[in-house]
Amino acid sequence: MITRRQIRIKAMQALYAHQLTGDNPAEVFKNNLQETYDILRDTDKKGQTDGDSGFLMRLFYDTITHEREFDKMIENRAQNWELGRMATIDRIIMHQALFEILYQDQIPIKVSINEYLDIAKEFSTPKSSQFINGILDTIQLSLKEEGKIIKTGRGLIENSPTSGNNEKETK
């Protein structure tokens, strides 16, 4: 079974390959994600269009489609930082998180941010997760104030219990 975290990582790696090579997105998808997509499609429920295979495809293609929009958001919030000076992997991670925040209405904002912070800790520099967290937090707060984030279902969940506060309740 392939987890959502693994899907996010595989998409990040393919987006990185796309950034470095400049190859056609369809070619990058075919070379880097097709096998995973096929496995996910086979495990999705029959006729399901919003399963993990669809998530992988949208995460890859829509992140590319909205790259300029996301770059503008990042540039407007990253004081004293030019996009060209940011690590490519950090920008890709922020792009993916912004895609989920804005265009995946079933995924809570905190889940998206936390997932990508963990990915940054694994794949980027030691300080990247703090940098990414600061940028994403200011962007999502601004987007909320502007009414641009629309979440439904599970995506509406704002606060998750912390393990320390509810330890007794879950035993």
Image (spheres, rainbow, N blue to C red):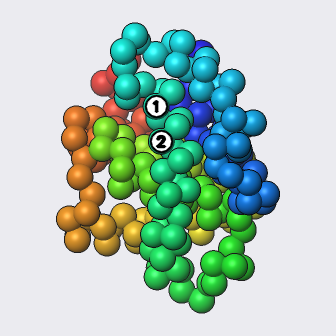
Q: Is residue 96 left or right of residue 22?
A: left
Numbered badge on residue 58: 2
Which of the numbered marks, if any, corresponds to residue 54? 1
Q: Local crowd at mark 1 within 10 Å, few (<14), some, or many (≥20)? A: some
Residue 39 drawn above or below residue 3: above
Q: Give the Cα separation between the discs numbered 1 and 2.
A: 6 Å
Is the residue under label 2 in contact with that under label 1 (CB below 8 Å)? yes
Residue 139 position (above or below residue 111): below
Residue 21 at x, y percent in the picture = 79, 57
Amino acid type at circle 2 is: Arg
Query: Image height check: is 87 above or below 35?
Result: below
Element type at marker 2?
A: helix
How many numbered tags mark residues here? 2
How crowded pointer 2 is (Cα within 10 Å; few <14, some 14-19, many 20+) is rated as: some
Residue 81 position, x and y percent, is 62, 84
62 left or right, relative to 125: left
